[in-house]
Image (cartoon, helix red, strand yellow):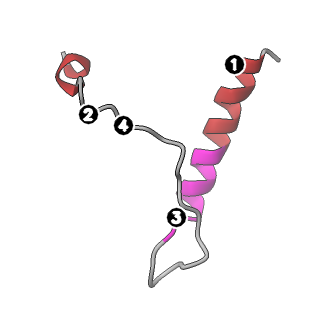
Amino acid sequence: MHKSGLAVLMTLLGLEKVKDDLYDRLGNPNGVIELGLAENKLCIDLIEK
């Protein structure tokens, strides 16, 4: 598998783990916090077009 394909796969697996075990301060303090997902708010108007 190409390195970029592996990176995509790892990202998807990580997001799946976050979805399955999402952190919550009171309800799930041992859950997973996703720190690697970025949101580009500077050009959101361009993305939505």
Between discs 1 and 2, the one toward the N terminus? 1
Q: Is residue 12 magenta?
A: no
Instruction: Please identify the dominant SS of the magenta region.
Output: helix
25 vs 36, left or right, is left
Instruction: Identify the mark at residue 4; answer none if there is no mark.
Output: 1
Amino acid type of the residue that numbered disc 3 sits on in the rendered structure: Leu
Instruction: Identify the mark at residue 39; answer none if there is no mark.
Output: 4
Query: Spatial distance from mark 3 to mark 4, Cα to Cα?
Result: 18 Å
Query: Spatial distance from mark 2 to mark 3, Cα to Cα?
Result: 23 Å
Between discs 3 and 1, the one toward the N terminus? 1
Please say if the residues under marks 4 and 2 sit with CB atoms less than 8 Å apart.
yes
- Residue behind mark 2: 41
Q: Relative to 1, does residue 31 appear above or below in the rendering?
A: below
Q: Quadrant of the N terminus?
A: top right
In percent of width and height, residue 13 lies at 67, 43
**Crowd rating for badge 3 (residues with CA inside 10 Å; few <14, some 14–19, many 20+):** some
In percent of width and height, residue 39 lies at 36, 37
Amino acid type of the residue that numbered disc 4 sits on in the rendered structure: Glu
Q: Measuring 48% from the left and 41% from the top, which residue is drawn there?
A: 37
